[in-house]
Amino acid sequence: MNAPTKLRTRKCRICREPYMQLNSLKVTCGKFECQVAFGLKHAEKSQSARAKKERKETRKAKDAMKTPRDLIPEAQIVFNRFIRLRDADEPCISCGRIEVEYTIGGQWDCGHFMSVGAKPELRFEEKNAYKQCKKCNGGSKYARKSHTVAQEYEIRLRAKVGDELVDWLKGPHAPKHYSTDDLRAIKALYQSKCKELQQ
Ligand SMILES: [Zn+2]
Ligand SMILES: [Zn+2]
């Protein structure tokens, strides 16, 4: 004797009205307009899935073509974010303020002690970068001001980490050459470090 067919009451995917489902492929109540609407919805869905897949492939291809020039700023953004998170409870390394004004770009930056321009080999050196307020990092166009900021940075850094490290930061160092793999690894490393700190 055959087991009785199990009939289930389901809700139509389109009009939400209950219907008896005779087989699992049937997902609408069976009204013509519901069948048409479901067919359209389904087609749209698979189209957008296809488009999504294509976008992903394009992104992958674009990423594979990136040069160190493209990847350095990407890794730098993540490294800088890590420094801000690491020093979240620290004052500005230059002016020592804890409370600073809000600006359009935010309140805090990652400030490199030896600038990236002067010592590019220290651009990803954690001991060379500290949280700095926007005002100090903004490097005013007035030479006198940025000179003062740099002096204050050095005084506070010497007090914080000691002379030996500061003297080492001042160099000289061997130049660094980053491959695209190195830069991807640096970016990934700081992404995971940021994630850890945000938890
Ligand atoms: Zn229906
Ligand atoms: Zn400051």
Image (spheres, grey):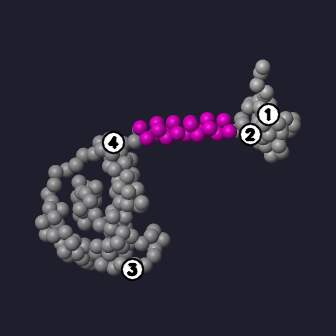
Within 10 Å of the Cα at label 3, are there few (<14), some (14-19), or many (20+) other Cα atoms? few
What type is the residue that disc 4 sits on?
Answer: Thr
Residue 85: x and y in percent read 37, 64
The mark nearer the N terminus, 4 or 1, is 1
The mark nearer the N terminus, 2 or 1, is 1
Q: Is residue 138 above or below residue 28?
A: below
Quarter of the image with the C terminus is bottom left
What type is the residue that disc 3 sits on?
Answer: Glu
Residue 155: x and y in percent read 20, 76
**Residue 187 seen in the figure:** no
Residue at 19% from the left image edge and 69% from the top image edge: 161
Number of the front mark, 4 or 2: 2
Number of the front mark, 3 or 4: 3
29 on left or right of 149? right
- Residue of label 1: 7
The mark nearer the N terminus, 3 or 4, is 3
- Residue of label 3: 99
Magenta part of the protein: which range?
A: 45-64
Real-space Cα separation, disc 3 to disc 2, in angstroms: 53 Å
Q: Marks 4 and 1: CB-CB under 8 Å?
A: no
- Residue 180 is marked as 4
Principal SS element in the magenta part? helix
Disc 2 is placed on an element classified as: helix
**Residue 27 seen in the figure:** yes
- Residue of label 2: 41
* Residue farthest to the front, as pictured: 1
- Residue 148 is marked as none
The mark nearer the N terminus, 3 or 2, is 2
Real-space Cα separation, disc 4 to disc 2, in angstroms: 43 Å
Number of the front mark, 2 or 1: 1
Is 61 magenta? The answer is: yes
Residue at 79% from the left image edge and 43% from the top image edge: 11
